[in-house]
Image (cartoon, helix red, strand yellow):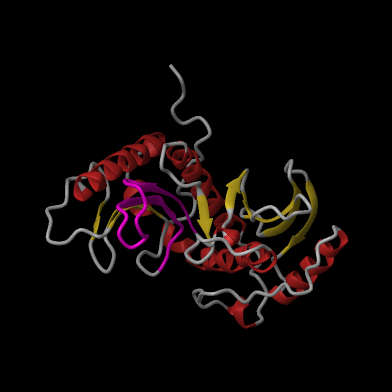
Amino acid sequence: MPDLNLNWKALGKVSGPDLAESRISLHHAAQLAACVGQILLSKRPDDSQMALSFLDGVMLGEPLPQDIRVGLRLATCCLEIQNQEGVLLSEFPLSGHPRTEALAWLRARLGEFGVNAESLTLSMPYELPPHPVADGGAFPKNASAALSELAHWFANAALLLAPLATQEDASALRCWPHHFDLAVLLSLEEEASPEQTRSIGVGLSPGDGSYAEPYFYATPWPYPKDVDFPALPFGHWHQSPWVGAVLTATELLQGPIETQRTRAEAFLAAAVEACEALLA
């Protein structure tokens, strides 16, 4: 019998609420990878020029014409430049350094690879949660346990969400730097307009204004109103201001370590099915 937990990384060494500070600092760090695509690549209709993908523990920006990518290694909060084969070309540990130093390093190193990066800035079309690094402070030191735990959450999410991204009418698995969530969008009909097309967003948030801890979610769009929400095997329904099935870290970690993956998989399968029923 195959091991259902193969490649799953056990969660719970750091409690969900205790990850908040490191999660926000990583959110700000990820902008250093996202801004490369946002500033140096042409704008796309879906704004995916700024999106990140998750591969082997790294949030990677979109490829540049020079066949290199800028990414953030989550477990070490380290900025990386890789080639298209995933070979590390250069790195800059962010811990103990302000964003200005990291941005200067990034401009210089990209220049060495033939990228004109003088226009590179951290000016992005959205606001981030407040954090001292946004005001010139250095990225925190000695947060290795929390960073590793967050990296495990994202790695596990990628493991469960990647099969969804292979379905017909599914988007690529992406991390959007605004919310810092890793998600797939399942379209249930041919697109008429983003406001009207029925769809289901399925993903992992490392925590946000709704929950101060990581959580898996499935959100139906448009949000249903005045309905009876289907029962879920785990988790609960979040109903305001957004609607979605949610499985928080606290809820997932109530079960045995050995069942973490199966519980998360069961939740996501039931949540997607429930969203489909709500949108039918």
Is residue 253 shown left or right of residue 176? left
At which x and y percent is residue 257? 41, 38
Quadrant of the snapshot with the N terminus: top left
Which residue corresponds to the image point at 66% horizontal and 81% vertical from the top-left?
136
At which x and y percent is residue 79? 71, 59
Q: Magenta includes 182?
A: yes
Q: How many marks?
A: 0
Residue 46 vertical position relative to residue 100 in the rendered view, above or below: above
At which x and y percent is residue 148? 58, 52
Residue 140 vertical position relative to residue 249 in the rendered view, above or below: below
- The answer, for residue 139, to whether it is visible in the render is yes
- The answer, for residue 253, to whether it is visible in the render is no
Q: Magenta includes 151?
A: no
At which x and y percent is residue 48? 55, 58
Which residue corresponds to the image point at 64% horizontal and 54% vertical from the top-left?
62
Q: Nearer the viewer, residue 21 or 274?
A: 274
Spot the residue most to the right.
112
Which residue corresponds to the image point at 36% horizontal and 41% vertical from the top-left?
264
Is residue 279 shown left or right of residue 60? left
Is residue 50 shown left or right of residue 276? right
Q: Which contiguous range is marked in magenta?
A: 181-208
Q: Nearer the viewer, residue 157 or 178?
A: 178
Is residue 170 shown left or right of residue 33? left
